[in-house]
Amino acid sequence: MKKINWYPPIILGLLALLVITFGALVASRASLGPTQHFSEDGSRETFEWKLVTTWPKNFPGLGSAPERFAKKVEAMSAGRLKIKVYGAGELVPAMGVFGAVSDGAAQMGHGAAYYWKGKIPAAQFFTAVPFGLNAQEMNGWLHHGGGLELWEEIYAPFDLIPMAGGSTGVQMAGWFNKQINSVEDLKGLKMRIPGIGGEVLNRAGGTAVTIPGGELYTALQTGVIDATEWVGPFNDLAFGFHQIADYYYYPGWHEPGSILEFIVNKTAFEKLPPDLQEIVRTAARDANQDMLDEYTARNNRALKELVEKHGVRLKRLPAEVIAHLQKINDQIMEETAARDPQFARVYKAFKEFEREVIPYHQISEEAYYQARALKDSE
Amino acid sequence: MKKINWYPPIILGLLALLVITFGALVASRASLGPTQHFSEDGSRETFEWKLVTTWPKNFPGLGSAPERFAKKVEAMSAGRLKIKVYGAGELVPAMGVFGAVSDGAAQMGHGAAYYWKGKIPAAQFFTAVPFGLNAQEMNGWLHHGGGLELWEEIYAPFDLIPMAGGSTGVQMAGWFNKQINSVEDLKGLKMRIPGIGGEVLNRAGGTAVTIPGGELYTALQTGVIDATEWVGPFNDLAFGFHQIADYYYYPGWHEPGSILEFIVNKTAFEKLPPDLQEIVRTAARDANQDMLDEYTARNNRALKELVEKHGVRLKRLPAEVIAHLQKINDQIMEETAARDPQFARVYKAFKEFEREVIPYHQISEEAYYQARALKDSE
């Protein structure tokens, strides 16, 4: 038998093994690459979004919601969704927020639905209507009463998804340079008051004007207006209205529980993997609650300072005036509903929910406030 | 020169290369393995948690919060944190929840802090105290008034992190087999009422008894008790108390805005990467709001059915009775504070916040409820 030289076969075998092993290494590296960026469901992709707001950057209360939201989203997504917040005018003007998010120039916005009433009269129901639902009731309607579904339907043609984005609680009726003792005192009153509240004032004989927040102080100081509403003690104190004159300060009727809004460009939202979509929705819900909690905690201290330190005279509107404003408001709501079928449809749903919640709150929340006030009456 | 046989060195070289390449493959696999489970910050590791509750599984309202929470966490974490919810008695009895989570037998629990008053009298402030804060105010105190920090401090020795886990709003005073027209009518009244409210009833001449929810129906039916409180119309209707007798149904004073709790085992929580920690916190906040929204939307419909369909007689407790109960309550609170320094410290903080919020709510929320009720008065 011829002696076989075993070396070449061994070399060939080793070479083959080397090729296989090296191939496995390359394949392994190839699979390692994407694993760093995508999980099985693609969720390791990163996104950078812009969020434009109708408030000055870091505006107390209202402006802190988008900041909190962006931080939460970044933390929950471990940096996969980074959201940069822009104050009003930084990227688009305050009133350009709806258009910018609808067009996709920004992926998100934060503001208030009633700012878009020129385009969508029914949008006002998703912020506040005079003598309507308070904050707790609005949240009940939106999240367990069909309100959010209506809102989504109305914003869908604009490629927008709305989400509740915070609440101020009951807003104050505002600052008046004279006492309001009767319906007569509203006649000739020139007041900054937006939305349906402004229409009510007009029909009561006053003149509602629209003035951006930044120009309000000067407008009051120069006597361009006799009165203004803004938000409530926490924001009003910071604005310094009390420094201008000896005002009368009245509790509210026109914005009983304003809900702010997040709007998300639908096309952008649908590009997110499901986990990031859920993170966006949940962070919005968190910010929605946190704002009301902050106003609840801070308003009273500010009110106390206004009254005790700055001598602001806190008064109540007479029942006669309230009832009169309410009657006018009902007329305006009915007339708008008669002109605008979408407004009519939301108004109907809103009123149905009012009937679902108001009688219970009379015997629960309201009765409780009264019971608690009996403290020193025995 | 001796001819060199090149084969052995080639073989040795190839073998060396094979070892290196194979080694690289092993190293790459080793790094690939964890990469599937950990991102740069370790966040791809998966966790399975148990959440034990003090409610029957899927109990309406109260029991839906942990279910919603678990679903949200799983969706936001893309399945990296799976939480299985156990009803009362499935893993531990209702009253064993605190201990099980403290010991780490379960990573989370859902219940109410006042259940643990035997161990921690001060825990009651984090659910509800009679004539205390309502739901909106509790949330303000916890999240922007220092309340949560106190709660965390008090639970820390038990290796527990507390988070607000929903609210029922104002609870009803309950179901009575006779009308309460005076303080005298409370004498001899045998009533199921837990917590400080029960102590108040005892001192007013009644007898407070503790009966688990599941035995309440029978206790009323057999006349063991004359009266019971439970939650509010939404839950009370489902319980069917109205089927037993012609009861009088009274609005509440003893639990003005009960906050439920999530408890998290601190050691387990700290093992989570930061993104999952934030997901847990935010999902809890979401569930906290969602429960109040659901009760707000559903209570009135249930109340209407109770009154209109089942003839339940809805009454108000006379002011004299409310004021009397309030006076007794203040005495009990002061006495407990005198015995228990921790209770005293939380009571002080709670009262300070009450002074920070109650006067504003009188002129905002309460005044608004009154203004809205003037609708048909003109």
Image (spheres, coloured by chain):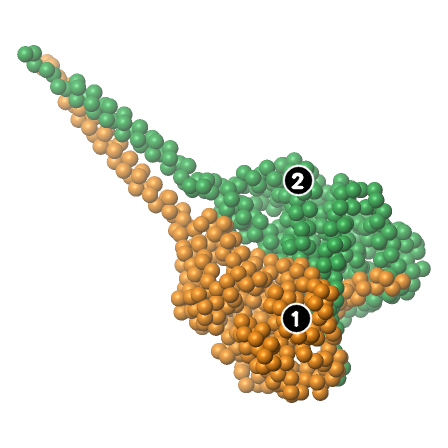
Chain colours: A orange, B green
Which quadrant is home to the N terminus of chain A? Answer: top left
B32 left or right of B203?
left
Q: Which residue is painted at 62% across and 83% down in the image?
A: A190
A200 left or right of B187?
left
Q: Secondary structure at mark 2?
A: helix
For badge 1, the amino acid type reads His
- Which of these two is toward me, A242 or B96? A242
Q: Secondary structure at mark 1?
A: helix
Residue A291 in picture, x, y percent from top left: 60, 60
Q: Which residue is painted at 63% across and 59% down in the image?
A: A294
C-alpha distance separating marks 2 and 1: 45 Å
Which quadrant is home to the C terminus of chain A? Answer: bottom right
Residue A242 badge: 1
Q: Is residue B28 above or below residue A190?
A: above
For badge 2, the amino acid type reads Ala
Q: Is residue A375 above or below residue B283?
A: below
Q: For mark 1, name the chain.
A: A
Q: Does the CB distance between marks 2 and 1 fall below 8 Å? A: no
Residue B156 badge: 2
Residue A365 in sight in this render: no
- Which of these two is toward me, A240 or B174? A240
Residue A116 in sight in this render: yes
- Which of these two is toward me, A348 or A110? A110
